Amino acid sequence: MSRIVRSRAPVAFLRAIFVALLVAMPQLLLQPEHTQATQLVALAALLAGGFTFVEYVAPAPSLVEFRDARPYNRIRAIFMILGILAACVMFRPGWDAQPLHDLLHHLGEAWHDGLMPWTPVHLLVGSLPAEADPHLVQSVQAAATAIYGLSLLMILTFLVAVRWLNWPGHGVFNVWVNLPQFDPMAGGDVVQRLQHDAQVNLALGLLLPMIAPMVADLLSAPFDGIALREPAALVWTLMLWAFLPASLAMRGLALHRLASLIASHRARLRQNDGFERLA
């Protein structure tokens, strides 16, 4: 066991560094000066890196799902990086003249003017305070359009991996490692439980980007305070708004795929058993 842990430790350490940099990226790109917020972000990055190292070096994780079911977590990490970079381009002072900034700005305007008014991006922008700076509103609109579009593309990419690349592959899928919070022996049919969880996750993934701004608006709690004063906090607010539901949708697709695989395996076993009885 210790030999396995040692062989997994270097990769787990690299993953921990990557996650720590991911957490710190908005602060490093937007507010590089030494402030109290920077110290808090550094602490959060260290905690996230330490948690990642423990989860990936252990024989089985306690919270991280699909640890050994590539490329599930890699897809999420890649699109999260792209989303953070897109948001930072819109909010970093002095980057107004960058070609990518202009492209994202035009995409935001096209989304706002060309689509129906009840999209998640429209609802998010509508929850901003009425007295917010128009330039900030345009930046939030462009960043939200880019981040939400990337979150949808992340779901589509994983759907391609499921449908055409046969995720999670033809090898043995270790439920203990890849679904640490799922107990196959908890009672009830495993396939039905997986299908139910898949439907719940898919529904939340589709509805949360629309529900969250509407609830915030109804509670008279629009994006205000630190979320507007601190660009890095605004970036993470947008990332949570888009990528948390998208991650739930991905989880729903993954659970539905596993339920289908188990059901197919059961059908093959019944068929083979029938052939043996006939023989």
Image (cartoon, grey):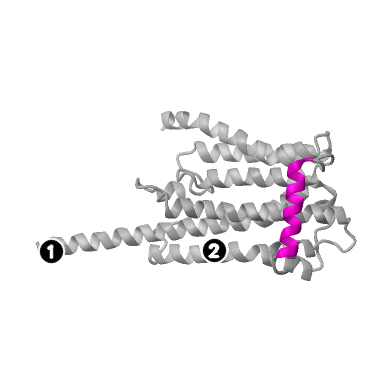
Q: Residue at x 64, y 43 (%)?
A: 81
Task: Determine whether, in the image, residue 18 is placed left or right of residue 170.
Answer: right
Report the predominant secondary structure element of the magenta stretch.
helix
Residue 113 lies in magenta, yes or no? yes
In which image quadrant can residue 193 be found?
A: bottom left
Q: Which residue is drawn at 81% across and 41% down?
A: 97
Q: Which of marks 1 and 2 is in front?
A: 2
Considering the numbered disc 2 on the image, is that residue within a helix, a strand or a loop? Answer: helix
Amino acid type at image mark 2: Leu
- Please say whether residue 40 is visible from this viewpoint: no
Q: In which quarter of the image is the N terminus?
A: top left
Residue underneath mark 2: 202
Q: Residue at x 12, y 64 (%)?
A: 277
Q: The magenta stretch spans which residues?
A: 98-114
- Nearer the observer, 142 or 33: 142
Residue underneath mark 1: 277
- 73 lies above or below 205: above
Task: Determine whether, in the image, residue 262 is placed left or right of residue 47.
Answer: left
Q: Residue furthest left?
A: 279
Q: Residue at x 74, y 40 (%)?
A: 41
